[in-house]
Image (cartoon, rainbow, N blue to C red):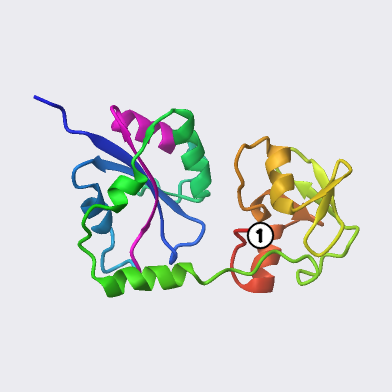
Amino acid sequence: MTPQLSVVYVLTNPAMPGMVKIGRTSHDDAKTRIDQLYTTGVPVPFKLEFVCKVPNSEEVEKALHLAFAPHRVNPKREFFSIEATQAIAILKLLHVHDSTAEVESQPTILEKSEVDAGIQLSKKKKPNLNFDEMQIAIGSLLTCKSNEATVVVTTSKKVNLNGEEMSLTAATRKVLGNQYNVAPCPYWLFNGESLSIIYDNTYGEDDDE
């Protein structure tokens, strides 16, 4: 008897900024199972960021949950305070079979109005990080929480890292040694205060630039 294929998925929800859900389900009804996560307690449907076929979905899911355990929002829930790109990058390193397009093409149990509501909320772009608006002057020093690397603010949207001008997103990728971008604010301090707090005080929500 042919074993049932299973998948590991990475989801986001525009009503839950800054959080990613990592789970697994059977392949044949993956779209239906993911759509069923849209319950009365969730304002809009989840967005499928990535899904892959794997022969050992339980092991892969557990490995991801372990890797991101420090960022788990609730030990009884599969939500993590990370970027979707971080989970996707690890899955791609495992050379998994990308089934995102295939699963997205499966029939949905959602009504068009529900899908449209999620799309519209996703389109509401958050303000880009702007040092002038955040009252961080040119010449200010920012310090990375992880390794105490520093950058100097050069324009309203650029910093200098080791003599090279770039966005704070690019600088974050370099100082962390990542192959993928992450939201930069949680990783930097200005005068001992997290940029996430400064961004939130300026714009009312966390940065995802």
Question: In the image, residue 157 lies at what x, y percent?
Answer: 77, 61
Question: In the picture provided, is 54 more to the left or to the right than 136?
Answer: left
Q: Is residue 51 magenta?
A: yes
- Residue located at (59% from left, 59% from top): 208
Q: In front here: 100 or 157?
A: 100
Disc 1 marks a residue whose amino acid type is Ser
What number of labels is visible? 1
Residue 146 visible from this viewpoint: no
Q: Quadrant of residue 28?
A: top left
Residue 195 picture quarter: bottom right
Q: Quadrant of residue 94?
A: top left
Other-residue count near label 1 (Cα within 10 Å), few / some / many at <14 / 14–19 / ≥20: some
Q: Is residue 201 magenta?
A: no
Span shown in magenta: 44-65
Q: Which residue is mark 1?
A: 196
Residue 181 x %, y %: 61, 46
SS class, disc 1: helix
Q: Is residue 154 left or right of residue 78?
A: right
Camera-nearest residue between 141 and 97: 97
**Residue furthest left in the image:** 1
Q: What quarter of the picture does the N terminus occupy?
A: top left
Residue at 67%, 63% (x, y): give it. 197
Q: Position of residue 98 (x, y in %)?
A: 38, 38
Residue 100 visible? The answer is yes
Q: Residue at x 76, y 72 (%)?
A: 133
Residue 81 image point, x, y percent: 50, 51
